[in-house]
Image (tube, rainbow, N blue to C red):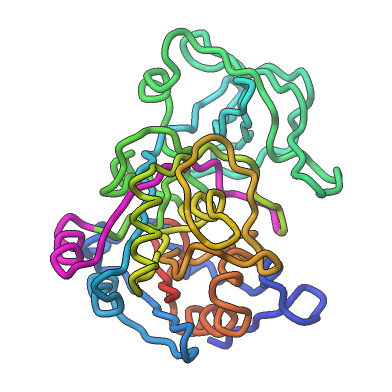
């Protein structure tokens, strides 16, 4: 397979608009366990910042590329069954609870076990949900700086349920799935070994390949693991769509451990773009991480760079996704471009059940 990476108009690559053709056969629609692998049996492409080299391995060998004193920062947010059937043959994906108590939601149409976008929502539309619950669309959600053109993907909405929302979702919802070929996998397939605080619409999937055995091996070798929380919204962003505000918490002990590791020649390695966003939100101009919580609107980009993150474990992201700008801020343009070319040529698998990428 020949990998072609460019911007849509053929100009010089920008991380936020890294464009390529993603073949359907590279989209992982089933967890590795369904393919006879352990969670940590997925493939791992390691990209080295120091010399630009690349190495192909499996995630179970992660410890070979880390060193004592490094600190892995993980997201302990747990995935909610955030897809709820609505009367009329639609699905409502509950993405993010906003500061004022309303929700960002996405309307979808079931297709097989998955779903596709439903573009015909309108202000004032009320969707009836099971057990007397409802969703009312209040206003389109437009990312800052995005021209209001085309159908609305995300809506600000009022969600009304009887009783506790999390209990309601566990009774009537199921995990968010995309595409006609998505499998009907249980919620447990969408949880990481670190998950302990429900709140994410979708799994912080960079942590999925960790197993208790692997974590034990890493800690035994002197590699630390420390938590943050960032509750993720839906990941079906349009091309070039910036991330919206998300709830996060960086505990004081994690901030102290990141600063201590980096002060003693260790590296702070974010397990996922969510962790990167949380740490960079609380980092000061000198790169020191501080405890903090609330809502982050911070967008990591090549222009702003990173201050507290020395490396990242991440999945493979869609063409022109905003996550690619974050990765370029860490890896640099050339290394990111060559990593994606190698992953495409080597048949790496995309999406939350797919393979992983370590930039260090």
Q: Along the horizontal axis of the image, is 222 left or right of 310?
A: left
Could you say where residue 331 lies in the image, as x and y percent from the top left? 54, 76
Q: Residue 84: horizontal and vertical position, in percent?
A: 50, 27
Question: What residue is at 46 percent from the left and 10 percent from the top?
Answer: 131
**Where is residue 74 shown, x and y percent of the image?**
36, 53
Residue 256 versus residue 96 in the image, above or below: below
Q: Would you say residue 179 is visible in this rendering?
A: no
Residue shown at the point (73%, 19%) measured from the top left: 125
State the residue in front, 10 or 62.
62
Left or right: 11, with 195 as reference point: right
Vertical side of 193 occupied by 301: above or below: below
Left or right: 139 as drawn, with respect to 107 = right
Going 36% across and 50% down the picture, which residue do you hit?
254
Span of residues in magenta: 211-239
Q: Quadrant of residue 150?
A: top right
Up-down: is 248 above or below 25? above
In reply to whether residue 216 is colored magenta, the answer given is yes
Queried whether the magenta region covers residue 222, the answer comes back as yes
Q: Position of residue 297 (x, y in %)?
A: 64, 44
Question: Viewer-proximal residue, 236 or 193?
Answer: 193
Quadrant where the image shows the C terminus: bottom left
On the picture, is 146 further left or further right than 77?
right
| Depth check, front residue: 107 or 299 | 299
Residue at the spot 71% in from the left edge and 67% down from the top edge: 303
């Amino acid at each position: 397979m020949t990998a072609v990476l460019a911007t849509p108009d053929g100009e010089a690559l920008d991380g936020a608009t890294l464009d390529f053709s993603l073949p359907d056969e590279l989209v992982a629609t089933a967890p590795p366990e369904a393919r006879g692998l352990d969670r940590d049996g997925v493939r791992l492409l390691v990209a080295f910042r120091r010399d630009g080299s690349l190495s192909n391995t499996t995630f179970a060998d992660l410890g070979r590329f880390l060193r004592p004193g490094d600190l892995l920062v993980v997201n302990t947010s747990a995935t909610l069954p955030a897809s709820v059937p609505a009367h009329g043959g639609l699905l409502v994906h509950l993405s993010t609870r906003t500061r004022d108590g309303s929700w960002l939601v996405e309307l979808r149409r079931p297709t097989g076990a998955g779903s596709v976008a439903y573009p015909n929502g309108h202000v004032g539309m009320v969707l009836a949900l099971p057990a007397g619950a409802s969703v009312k669309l209040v206003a389109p959600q437009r990312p800052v700086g995005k021209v209001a053109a085309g159908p609305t993907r995300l809506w600000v909405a009022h969600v009304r349920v009887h009783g506790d929302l999390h209990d309601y979702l566990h009774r009537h919802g199921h995990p968010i799935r995309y595409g006609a070929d998505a499998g009907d996998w249980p919620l447990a397939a969408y949880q990481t070994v670190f998950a302990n605080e429900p709140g994410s619409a979708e799994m912080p999937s960079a942590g999925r390949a960790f197993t208790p055995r692997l974590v034990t091996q890493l800690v035994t070798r002197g590699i630390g693991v420390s938590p943050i929380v960032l509750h993720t919204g839906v990941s079906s962003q349009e091309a070039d769509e910036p991330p919206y505000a998300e709830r996060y918490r960086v505990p004081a002990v994690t901030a102290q451990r990141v600063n201590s590791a980096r002060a003693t020649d260790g590296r702070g390695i974010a397990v996922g773009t969510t962790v990167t966003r949380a740490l960079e939100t609380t980092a000061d101009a000198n790169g020191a991480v501080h405890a903090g919580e609330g809502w982050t609107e911070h967008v990591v980009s090549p222009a702003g760079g990173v201050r507290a993150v020395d490396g990242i474990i991440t999945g493979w992201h869609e063409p022109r996704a905003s996550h690619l700008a974050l990765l370029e801020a860490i890896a640099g343009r050339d290394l990111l471009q060559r990593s994606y070319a190698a992953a495409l040529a080597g048949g790496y698998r995309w999406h939350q059940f797919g393979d992983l990428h370590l930039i260090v």
